[in-house]
Image (cartoon, rainbow, N blue to C red):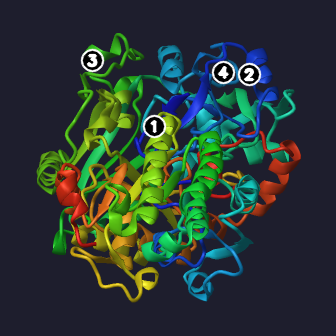
Amino acid sequence: MTLLTGWGRTAPTPARLSRPQSVEEVAALVRAATGRGVVARGLGRSYGDAAQNSGGVVLDCTALAPSWDHDPATGLVTASAGMSLHDLMTELVPRGWFVPVTPGTRHVTVGGAVAADVHGKNHHVDSSFGAHVRSLTLLTADGTLRVLTPDDELFWATVGGMGLTGVVVEATFACVPVETSRMRVDVERTRDLDETLEVMAATDDRYRYTVAWIDLLARGGRMGRSVLTRGDHARRDELPVRMRRDPLAFAPRPRLAAPPWVPGGLLNRATVGAFNATWYGKAPAARRGLVQGIAPFFHPLDGVAHWNRMYGSRGFVQYQFVVPFGAEETLRRVVERLSNAGVVSFLTVLKRFGPGTPGMLSFPMPGWTLALDIPVGQRGLAGMLTVFDEWVAAAGGRLYLAKDSRMPASMMAGTYPRLEEWRAIRDRADPEGVFRSDLARRLCL
Amino acid sequence: MKNALGSVDTVLLLGGRSEIGLAIVERLVRDGARRVMLAARGGTAPVDRLRKMGAEVHLADFDAARPETHAALIEDAAARLGDLDVVIPAFGVLGRQAVYDADPVAAARDVAVNFGGHVSIGLAAARRLREQGHGTLVVLSSVAGVRVRKANFVYGSAKAGLDGFAQGLADSLHGSGARVVVVRPGFVIGRMTEGMSPAPMSVTVDTVADAVIEGLRSGRRTVWVPGRLRPVFAVMRVLPQAVWRRLPR
């Protein structure tokens, strides 16, 4: 038995961890499943218990027959599910292609990107990962392989289905051509939340990629002050001359690593407050045309290996919700409450979502999404998040399953209107309930 | 499942009329538990309060003196609640030593409940928790069992047995993901001790329940209530027998 947690390092549970090398091995393990079931795990970047299965089997799919294929004529990439977006980018970027969607880390697998229907800074124009998938191969509970396309209902139960319909073993998705491995970025600061929302609503559509970092510790008239970072893939002629010789160079690696043990409470009001003030202060009031690499633009935290250790041994929770456009008041109340409570959230990001995918348990919907990390152990945290749950649900919003580690089952049932439909399809694909996870138990999926 | 902030989903209370047991269940429901089973012989305490707090309450018939039914009860609870997050055997009888002196059969019967009943339900629950890979068994021991006194040595010896059982069980579950919390309250003012004059450092039912909740959250293995009984009993344990024997109660 191996104790597993998600990226937030909370609520560990033991499971038999297998590391299948081939699809046949996965099929054998699925067929041999006992009452506690099986779930696939990738690089463990879900924050909560999505890739944990207490007392059951967890399939570490990262060694699963790594292979990929790219058709330059169509831009379609077919990759085995255990491949990371990092490995794919390392192959694709120098060839002039980029993944259709990348979350805030490259260290997620293709299978995980499908199962969580991940989104990135381009959601407002490009939707989430599932929108770009043309077909996927799913190993279902009977141990057989099914090739699914967006015409199949099981496809949309699998996209965002958190691995509970089967094991994704391969996916084919459309990539985007790029001239360079650099981003052309505009940075600007806003004074408060109102200005942040205004500027994003008015001008986000001019950029393919946008995000706002919010200084949650700023109060009063400065509450919700933000740094907006928005950009597009740079064209070759936009690069400084010295970069033009090798415009597609891409070889990111972490520059720092968090030590194996960090005292709890290192990230507190004082340290995070100082960080936030510096971060906000060093951002230019407005700077246009900055040229940045893919890694610092999309994945700043990948620069610090094991950054999740910085929250200490008790771990942290990530709270990410979306509320529809028109519910800005809810967003404001949440930010106000967090700001007044002096909640220490190291990286709080705000993003505008565009249309979602037909994924039944897919998270994104048109509206505003706010994501924050909070170390476990802050006083009154559970109660405050319960209040936010109520506000978010009342506004017609919901929480992101890949981030969640604490919502009650009632919140899930009340905010994912297609849950029953998803259950019916899942039950047909997996009548015995072979695919199980701690998240599924906690949320009664 | 226990969530990232320590809230649980399901609770099984054995001894569904126990004041301490119910106080613990209420707190777990307040903190998010949504499915509860109360098991007792011949009816449990009124459950409206728990239902009003939002819990789905299941009832079951349970007789601590019939160990042959215990494994089935645990299975039934798991079938109705799902994974068992917290199991609290809170049944017990506190008889008077004078009565036991006069009626050895009654003494043996009560020991069978206070010790034997906990052994069979504890082992059945442990098997389930081990299989789940998570969950906590709360064992309500007592300082009466830490060092047995002549004033209540039948009750005390059953608690001593239970405490030893719980320690061994906790060790055997180590590494399985499941765990045991051993609670050692002092004199608890409540229905069970009605008519008795409180001993020094008495506590209320609510204090015990609060301490158990804290123990569940902190991951501590032994919870003394009040906490200062721990150093007190470190001394009590080594008092010479001649002194111990003379304790008035």
Q: Earlier in the sequence, mark 4 or mark 3?
A: 4
Q: Label 4: chain?
A: A
Query: Label 4 amino acid?
Result: Ala
Between residue A389 and residue B116, name the one nearer to us.
Answer: B116
Q: Are marks 2 and 1 on the same chain?
A: no
| Position of residue A179 measured from the top left corner of the image (x, y, whole percent) | 47, 23
Give me the disc on residue A79: 4
Q: Earlier in the sequence, mark 2 or mark 3?
A: 2
Q: Which residue is mark 1?
A: B171
| Position of residue B142 measured from the top left corner of the image (x, y, whole percent) | 38, 62
| Residue A175 visible in this rendered orientation of the protein | no
| Residue A39 visible in this rendered orientation of the protein | yes
Give me the disc on residue A241: 3
Q: CA distance from mark 4 to mark 3?
A: 35 Å
Image depth: mark 2 or mark 3 in front: 2
Q: Which residue is mark 2?
A: A26
Q: Label 2: chain?
A: A
Residue drawn where x is 49% and y is 76% of the image: B99
Local packing at callout 4 (Cα closer than 10 Å; few below 14, some 14-19, many 20+) is: many
Query: Label 2 amino acid?
Result: Val
| Position of residue A316 measured from the top left corner of the image (x, y, whole percent) | 35, 49
Image depth: mark 4 or mark 2 in front: 2
Query: Label 1 amino acid?
Result: Asp
